[in-house]
Image (cartoon, rainbow, N blue to C red):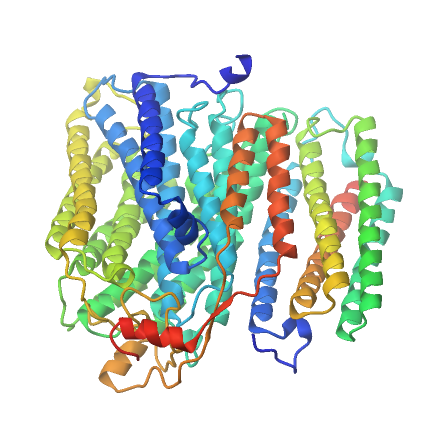
Amino acid sequence: MEFFDRFAVPHPSPLIYASMVAIALTLIAVVIGITYFKKWGYLWREWLTTVDHKRIGMMYIISALLMLFRGGVDGIMMRLQTAVPENSFLDAQHYNEVFTTHGIVMIIFMAMAFIIGMMNIVVPLQIGARDVAFPRLNAISFWLYFAGAMLFNVSFVIGGSPDAGWTNYFPLAGTDFSQSVGVNYYMWALQISGLGTLMTGINFIVTILKMRAPGMTLMKMPMFTWSALITNVIIVFAFPVLTIALLMGTLDRQFGTHFFASTNGGMDMLWANLFWVWGHPEVYILILPAFGIYSEVIATFSQRNLYGYKSMVGSMVLISFMSFLVWVHHFFTMGHGPLVNGIFSITTMAIAVPTGIKIFNWLLTMWKGKIRFTVPMLYSIGFIPLFTIGGVTGVMLAIASADYQYHNTMFLVAHFHNVIIPGVVFAMLAGLTYWWPKVFGFMLNERIGKWGFWFLSIGFCLAFFPMYITGLDGQARRMYTYSEETGFGPLNLLSFFGAGLMAIAFILIVFNIYYSFRNSPRNVGQDPWNARSLEWATHNPVPEYNFAVTPVVNSSEAFWDSKKNGHNLFPDKFEKIHMPNNSGVPVIMAGFFFIFGFSFVFSIWIGVILAALGIFGCMAYRTFENDHGRYISVEEIKETEKKYGGAK
Amino acid sequence: MKLDKSQPLEYGTHQNQMNILGFWIFLGAEIMLFGTLFASFFTLENGVGSGPTGADVFEITPVVLETIILLTSSFTIGLATHAMRINNKKATLVFLGITLLLGLSFLSVEIYEFIHYYHVGLTLQTSAFSAILLTTLGTHGAHVTFGLFWGLFIFLQIKKRGFTPETTNKSFIFSLYWHFLDVVWIFIFSFIYLKGLM
C-alpha cells in the first residue's frame, strides 16, 4: 500500500472527490459508448491515426473547447470565492491550486490549442497546399499537446495540483514551499506539450515558405497566413528557453540541484527571467494570430480590401522582434536599478506603436465599407474598443515607477484579461464562426451567435472593469479572501455576476453548435460569406485533397479577383494527387510520453526508463519505415468533384 | 515524386528540400536552447557556494582530447557527405563509421571527465555552478549520444538500401546535426573551459 500512498491528494475536499467520481463515470461512459456503437475501428482509422491537417485542426479545437470548460470552471470558482468578503467556499490552498491551473489551462491548453487548431485548418487552404510540410510530425505535435494536457489535468485527482501560480516563481515553486508533486506536473505537462508546439512551429514555417501556390509571393499571402508565419517564428525562438527553464526546475525539485535556490550560489531571479523571456513572446504568440483573424474578418465583412497591407506585415514583424525585448516589465518591482527599469519601460511603451498602427488599419478598412454585422464581424468590432482599453492600461503598467502601485494587484489581472479575452478569445470565436462552414458545410445560427456575443461582451465588462478599481484601491491578486472593511465586496460581487453572464455566453455558443447541427441547411454553397481569400475557392466541407487542381494566384485576395475580375484560379487539368498515409505511431508515441511524464512526476524510475525506451523505439521504427504515401487517381478525383456538384 | 536531376540527390525532391529547410529551422531552435544554457552558465558561474570553482576541477588533457576528437569527426562526416555526392557507397560508409567511432570515443572521455568531477567533489548537487556546468555538458553529451544511435540507423539504411532520395537526405541532415554539435562544443571549449581555466 505504501507505493500507492503517493498518489493520494494531499489536501482533499468534497469537490475533488466529486470530480474523481465524475471523471471515472465519464471515462466508463465513453468507453462503454464507443464499444456499444462499435466505433473503436472508426475512431482509430479516421481520427487517432489521421495525418490530415483539417482533422488535426478539429481535434485541437475540440480539445481547446474542453479545456475552456475546465479553465472556465476554475475561473467561476475564483469569482464565487471572492464574491463576498470572508467567504469560505475555497480555502487558501485550494484557491492557490485553482488560480494556478486556471492560468496554465487557459493559456497553454486552451488559447494555444485553439490558435494552432485554426492554423492547421486554415493555413494550408489559404496558401493552396494539400497538407502541411510534415503531416506525420503534425500528428505528433497534436498528440504531444494532448498528452501534456491530460497529464496536467489528472494532477488534481492524483497527487495534487500545482499551486505556485502559472508563473511558478521560485523559491515558492521549490520543494521547500511546494511539497506535493503538483509543480512536478507543471514541469512535465508544459515540457511535453511545449515540445509539440516547437514541432508545430517548424512545420508551419516550412509549410508557408515552401508550399505556397504558384504566383503567391510572400507579399501576396493572406494576412492570417502572415500572422501564422510570424507567430511560428516566435514559437521556434521562444520555446527552447522554456524547455531549459523547465529542465532546470525539474532538476531543482527532483534531483536536489541549486539553480533557483537561495543557497549554494543559486539565483531565484533566474527562473523569473527565463520564464518571461519565453513568457512575453508567448503573449504575442497568442495575439498575432488573433490579429490575423480580425484582418480576414474585417476585410470580408466591410467588403473592402485590407487597408495598409504592407504596414500590417511590417508592424507584425516589428512586434515579433520587440516581443523579445520587454520581459523585465513583468517584475519591475523585483530589485533592478532605474536604468534597467527605464530601458524596459521604454521598449514596452514602444511596442504599443506597431499595435496602434494595426488598430488604425482596421478602422480604415471599415471606413466607407459596406459593413455586414455578422457574428464574426461583431466580435471584431467589439474587439477594437475593448482591446484598446486593455492596451492603454498596458501602457500605464509599463510606467516602471507607477508600476509599484499596480504590481500584483487586481489592476494587472483586469489588464491582461482585457487584452486576452477581447483579443484572443473574441478572435477565436470570430474565426470559429467564420470558418465553421468551411469545415462542416453548414453555418452556425446567427441569431444565437449574436446573443452569445452580447452576453460575452457585457459579461466581460462587468467581470473585469471593476477589478481596475479594486486594484487601484489596493486589492492584491491571488488573495483568496478579504475583510469587509476593505470595501472590495460590492465590486467583487459585480465581477461574479459578470462571470456568470460569460458562462451563459459559452453555454449559448455550445448550444449554438448543437442547434445548428440539427437545423442549419446543408447546402451553403462554396462562398457563404462572399469572402476574399483562397480558402473559399474550394468546396465546403473541404475534400481530403483540399484543391482538385493546384490554384494559380496573382494577389492577396485571389478568390475575390476570380469573382470580380475574372482571374482564372484553376488553369490546369486534373493530375493524380500524392497524399501521406495515416500512421498510429504518433498517438502511441504520445502515450509513451504520457507514461514518461507521469512516472517522472512521481519519480517511478522503472516507468521512466521503459517509457523512454518506448519513445526511442517509435523513433527507430520511423527511421527504418519505408512509407512513400499513396496516390489519389484522376478518376477518384473526378468522382469526388462530381459529388460536390460539378468539377471545377 | 518528381526527381530534380540538376540537384544533388539529397535535394532532389520537394519533400527533401523541405526536410532540409525544416532541419535548419530546428537548428535555430537548438541555438536558442544552448544559448539559454550559456546565458544561465554566465549568470551562475560564480555561484560556487562552498564547492570548487572551474579552475579547481578542470583538467586540460581530457578537454583537449575531446576537442580534437570531435573536430576530427566533423571533418570525417564532411568527407562522408562528399563521398555520397560522388556516389561512392563504400567510402561513405567508412567515413560515417569513423565519425560514429570518434563520437563514441568523445563520449568515453566525457564520461571519464564526469567521474573525475565526482571524485574531486563536484556533483550535480554541489552548487549552482556545478549544476549548470553539468547540465550544459550533459545536454551536449545527450545530443551526441542521440546522434550515435541516429547515425548508426542511417549507416544501416545506406548499407541495405544504397543511395536513395531518402537515405541521402537523412545522412545529409545528420551531417548538419553533427556539425552543429561541433560548433556548440567550440563554444563550450572557449567559454566554459578556457575561460574557467584562466
- A439 or A450: nearer the viewer: A439
- Residue A28, placed above or below residue A130: above
Q: Residue at x 55, y 31 (%)?
A: A268
Residue in view at x 33 percent, y 21 percent: A16
Question: From the viewer's perspective, is A64 left or right of A434?
Answer: right
Res A310 → quadrant: bottom left
How many numbered marks, from 0 up? 0
Residue A317's spot in the image, x, y percent?
Answer: 43, 64
Q: Quadrant of the C terminus of chain A?
A: bottom left
Residue A165 in sight from this viewpoint: no
Residue farthest to the top, as pictured:
A1
Q: Residue B195 appears at what percent x and percent y? A: 77, 45
Tell which of A578 and A224 is nearer to you. A578
Give the side of residue A178 with respect to residue A304, left or right: right
Q: Give how far across and how far down residue A549 sits, in percent.
A: 39, 78
Q: Is residue A244 shown left or right of residue A312?
A: right
Q: Is residue A523 visible?
A: yes
Give the image location of residue A335, x and y in percent: 49, 34
Q: Residue at x 47, y 61 (%)?
A: A204
Placement of A571 over or under A619, stated as above or below: below
Q: Nearer the viewer, residue A217 or A39?
A: A39
